[in-house]
Image: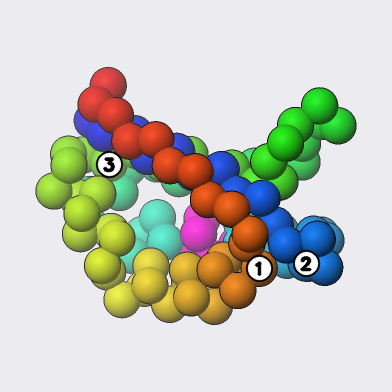
Amino acid sequence: MVKHIILWKLKSEHNNSDVKQGIKNGLEGLLVKIPGLVEISVQTASLESSNADVMLYSVFEDEASLKGYVTHPEHVYVANTFVRPFTETRLCLDFEA
């Protein structure tokens, strides 16, 4: 299994519940659309001590499945529509578990 963790800092003018819900709904909706995607969840409620606004936690069958996800048209659409226009910073950690 490969885990794919993303942390985003939203642009200050877009740090609101509507944007966060759009990211969450868009990404979590990919579960049944992406081959090899085993689990996906988006956390949008953070404590004040956090320095990120949104977290993606996803699990893939293998590294090839993760690579397929990155270029899959459904993922590209969600990323370009609901994520990238609103984010300032992105951090990623991928690892085998």
- Residue under circle 1? 86
Q: Nearer the viewer, mark 3 or mark 2?
A: 2
Where residue 90 sits in the image (x, y, percent)?
53, 50
Query: Residue at point 27% right, 21% down?
Result: 97
Asked if the residue under mark 1 is in contact with the one under mark 2, i.e. CB atoms within 8 Å, the reply is yes
Reading the chain from its start, which is encountered first: label 2 or label 1? 2
State the SS at label 1: helix
Q: Amino acid at mark 2?
A: His
Asked if the residue under mark 2 is in contact with the one under mark 3, i.e. CB atoms within 8 Å, the reply is no
Query: Residue at point 75% right, 32% down?
Result: 50
- Residue under circle 3? 60
Q: Where 51 sits versus 83, above or below?
A: above
Q: Residues within 10 Å of mark 2 (few under 14, many from 20)?
A: some
Q: CA distance from mark 3 to mark 2?
A: 29 Å
Q: Residues within 10 Å of mark 1 (few under 14, many from 20)?
A: many
Q: Nearer the viewer, mark 3 or mark 1?
A: 1
Where residue 68 sits in the image (x, y, percent)?
20, 59
Q: Where 32 sits versus 46, above or below?
A: below
Where residue 13 sits in the image (x, y, percent)?
82, 68
Query: Residue at point 73% right, 62% down?
Result: 11
In the picture provided, is 5 more to the left or to the right than 81?
left
**Residue 86 visible within the image:** yes
- Residue under circle 2? 14
Closer to the camera, 92 or 74? 92
Closer to the camera, 78 or 53? 53
